[in-house]
């Protein structure tokens, strides 16, 4: 039997379909689905099926000295027992095994992991390796026809990364978490790549916060013929100079020179992973989501492998034949126009031999894909077309005008030939058409304006921009950078996009930069990244790189150990600010996120036990205190982050709780009036605050709503109902709670039953 190992189930299914030339027969072994035809079985893994870890004795954080983890034994453990057992069973029956996982460092390691398990069951297995960049018929058949050897050195570099990241992450995370007292689900994560990346975000935020804007002025003049010109000095830093210039302006502008030259914009380079993520970020995709969708498109045969550093198409790709595939379908006009041109591909700065740039491998109808899948697919197709198109040509006009003794200027641009921009509309450039003028022509000045402006701080990093910077600094790899950013969000270190660090991020980075700066600088991880690449090139051995990393980490711990007390205090002081939600309306003490005896979370007053004001919080998810403030209660809005889910913007916790009370009261009232019985229970609405902290929070009194805002928050009351109630003299929730339902129904024409339910809800708010 010939056993073929793919990285994932869907890839295995598609490879089996291509190799069999027909629909392969599903084949289950130990609960794992494989695909059988002739004497072949194609089986998909689930990524890594084994992982590196410490022995069980090291699991207790409090009992094991963090520094011991640096040189502790590393063991390999199964992650997916079903697949491991299936591999062993199939390995015993097979006489040949082919590794067909993705061809990169991670894929090679995954393949070798599976290979070792199968060969343990059957040491006589013959092995080989196939490499491909697209799961399409021609490439898969070619890959299996030209099978080569397994690259154990490339796998070793991947294994070195696993071990180094485990040791650094486990030792430092435990140390920082224990020192700060942040354990359980709220532990503080520190990592070899994660921490210097987070430091970039925090340092940028510090630049923004410390930035002192500098005022400047710009002078504009409006002339006849619909011409607007700017003073040639551009930014003018002194107001006295501005006043002097304005005083010297005359009533007529004289055209001193007009120059028109062609400006050529070359087509963009092909997509590598970094530029793809950057482009996807520009159309609203997070780095992780863009890569997830790209991976799906790759596995299903629509685009090439999305993890690549290459920006040069290899000669093996028939670009003309590939473009012809699109003559029918969504991109027929573009393909036809492109085939009528020269079709000379652009070349980027990086050329590698493992994978080509990202390109479309097959046409697909828009109706066959989900909306997000189509957007990413279209981006890849249009970028591919743009790289084969001709340059974009502009007529660029530079105009100089004298108004009195003062020089002014204007620039115009007219699109002559759209070239690659016809295919790739994501990079916008607008025409600026100037009127037809002649040198020496005199134009009447219709007016002038002085615009006061300020210099702006540097912009925060968006995900695409940050990944580009990580690439430049050698932080992480094309396969890991988007995961690093996802972890920063999941650990509640950053929020929003562009990314803004939380106070927790400040506390961790400030402490590390002060007491162990090596962890926050890119140089250390750059060195290790280069060494890991050299493992794959047989220039250095895996054990030597792992030992080097352990020596580095030991020196870091020497720094940490000398300052443990200061580090603990620094972290605790910084972390406390991230727990402050607002000021208690009863006693003006700070409201802080707290934990109950059984692990529940709630917002409690720091004036306890004298003040017992509390508000509930959800049981699960990381709580992020944002910088948005509720105008009514003065509390910061809260965001809840759960792994694998979209963030939930809970908003003001006080408003959220009052809304929940109102909905519950309304449901109870409606249940009684509809005859559901005395025992009917109201269920909190979806995404409302729950948890054991709610019991204490119910005792907290809400605001009086004397300003009338409470009416608008009652479920079922919209603008029109508000108008009807107002015409009957009801403008606050308190007035509604005390009104006679029958009389109010007669005045407004509203249902008496609804009014009775609103009255009950209003009483909960009052």
Image (cartoon, rainbow, N blue to C red):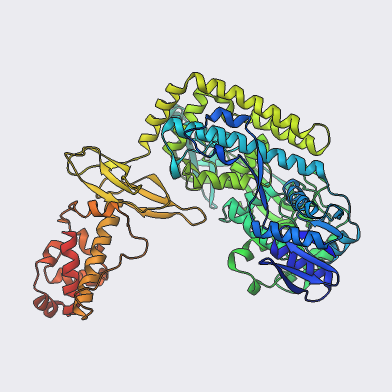
From the image, which quarter does the C terminus lie in?
bottom left
Instruction: Residue at 62%, 43% (x, y): give it.
Output: 467
Q: Position of residue 483 (x, y in %)?
A: 60, 47
Q: Residue at x 86, y 64 (%)?
A: 141
Task: State the image coordinates of residue 137 (x, y, percent, origin top left).
Answer: 82, 67
- Residue that extends furthest to the right in the rendered view of this protein: 146
Residue 155 visible from this viewpoint: yes
Q: As rendered, which of 315 and 652 lies closer to the eye? A: 652
- Residue 648 in the image, given as x and y percentages of width and height: 42, 55
Above or below residue 14? Residue 199 is: above
Pick the residue in front: 425 or 526.
Answer: 526
Query: In the shown orientation, is residue 681 left or right of residue 199?
Result: left
Note whether residue 213 is visible.
Answer: no
In which quadrant is the N terminus drawn?
bottom right
Residue positioned 21% across, 67% down in the render: 665
Image coords of residue 486 (percent x, y): 55, 48
């Amino acid at each position: 039997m010939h056993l073929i190992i793919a990285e994932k189930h869907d890839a295995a299914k598609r490879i089996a379909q291509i190799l069999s030339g027909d629909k392969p027969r599903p084949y289950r072994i130990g609960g794992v689905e494989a695909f059988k035809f002739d004497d072949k079985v194609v089986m998909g893994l689930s990524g890594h099926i084994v992982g590196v870890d410490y022995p069980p004795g090291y699991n207790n954080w409090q009992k094991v000295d963090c520094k011991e983890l640096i040189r502790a034994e590393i063991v390999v453990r199964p992650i997916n027992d079903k697949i491991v057992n299936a591999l062993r069973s199939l390995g015993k029956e097979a006489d040949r095994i082919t590794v067909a996982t993705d061809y990169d460092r991670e894929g090679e390691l995954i393949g070798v992991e599976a290979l070792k398990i199968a060969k343990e069951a059957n040491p006589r297995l013959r092995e080989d390796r196939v490499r491909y960049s697209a799961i399409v018929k021609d490439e898969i058949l070619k890959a299996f026809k030209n099978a080569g050897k397994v690259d154990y050195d490339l796998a070793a570099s991947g294994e070195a990364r696993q071990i180094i990241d485990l040791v650094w992450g486990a030792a430092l995370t435990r140390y920082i978490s224990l020192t700060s007292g942040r354990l359980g689900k709220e532990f503080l994560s520190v990592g070899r790549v994660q921490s210097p990346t987070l430091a970039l975000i925090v340092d940028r935020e510090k630049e923004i916060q410390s930035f002192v804007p500098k005022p400047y002025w710009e002078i504009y003049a409006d002339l006849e013929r619909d011409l607007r010109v700017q003073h040639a000095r551009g930014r003018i830093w002194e107001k006295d100079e501005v006043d002097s210039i304005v005083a010297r302006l005359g009533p007529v502008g004289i055209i001193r020179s007009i120059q028109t030259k062609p400006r050529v914009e070359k087509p963009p380079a092909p997509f590598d992973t970094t530029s793809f993520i950057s482009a996807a970020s520009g159309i609203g995709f997070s780095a992780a989501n863009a890569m997830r969708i790209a991976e799906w498109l790759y596995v299903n045969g629509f685009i090439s492998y999305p993890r690549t550093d290459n920006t040069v198409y290899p000669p093996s790709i028939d670009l003309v034949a590939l473009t012809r595939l699109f003559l029918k379908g969504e991109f027929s006009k573009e393909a036809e126009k492109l085939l009528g041109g020269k079709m000379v591909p652009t070349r980027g700065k990086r050329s590698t031999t493992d994978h080509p740039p990202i390109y479309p491998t097959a046409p697909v109808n828009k109706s066959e894909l989900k909306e997000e899948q189509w957007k990413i697919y279209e981006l890849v197709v249009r970028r591919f077309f743009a790289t084969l198109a001709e340059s974009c040509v502009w007529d660029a006009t530079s105009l100089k005008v004298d108004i009195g003794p003062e020089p002014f200027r204007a620039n115009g641009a007219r699109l002559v030939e759209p070239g690659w921009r016809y295919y790739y509309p994501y990079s916008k450039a607008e025409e600026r058409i100037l009127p037809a003028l002649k040198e020496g022509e005199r134009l009447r000045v219709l007016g002038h304006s002085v615009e006061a402006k300020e210099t702006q701080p540097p912009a925060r990093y968006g995900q695409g921009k940050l990944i580009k910077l990580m690439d430049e600094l050698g932080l992480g790899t094309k396969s890991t950078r988007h995961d690093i950013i996802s972890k920063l969000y999941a650990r509640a270190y950053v929020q929003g996009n562009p990314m803004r660090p939380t106070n927790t991020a400040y506390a961790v980075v400030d402490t590390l930069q002060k007491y162990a700066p090596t962890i926050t600088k890119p140089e250390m991880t750059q060195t290790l990244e280069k060494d890991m690449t050299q493992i794959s090139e047989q220039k250095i051995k895996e054990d030597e790189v792992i030992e080097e990393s352990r020596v580095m980490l030991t020196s870091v711990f020497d720094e940490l150990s000398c300052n443990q007390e200061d580090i603990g205090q620094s972290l605790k002081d910084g972390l406390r600010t991230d727990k402050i939600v607002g000021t208690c309306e009863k006693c003006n003490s700070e409201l802080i996120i707290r934990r109950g005896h059984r692990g529940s979370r709630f917002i409690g007053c720091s004036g306890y036990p004298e003040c017992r004001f509390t508000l509930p919080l959800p049981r699960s998810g990381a709580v992020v205190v944002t910088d948005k403030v509720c105008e009514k209660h003065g509390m910061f809005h809260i965001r809840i982050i759960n792994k694998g889910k979209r963030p939930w913007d809970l908003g003001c916790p006080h408003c959220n709780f009052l809304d929940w009370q109102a909905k519950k009261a309304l449901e109870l009232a409606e249940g009684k009036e509809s005859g559901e019985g005395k025992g009917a229970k109201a269920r909190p609405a979806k995404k409302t605050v729950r948890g054991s902290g709610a019991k204490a929070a119910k005792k907290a009194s809400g605001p009086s709503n004397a300003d009338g805002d409470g009416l608008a928050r009652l479920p079922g009351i919209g603008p029109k109902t508000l108008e009807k109630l107002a015409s009957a003299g009801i403008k606050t929730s308190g007035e509604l709670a005390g009104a006679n339902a029958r009389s109010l129904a007669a005045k407004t024409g509203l249902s008496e039953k609804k009014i009775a339910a609103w009255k009950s809800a209003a009483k909960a708010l009052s």
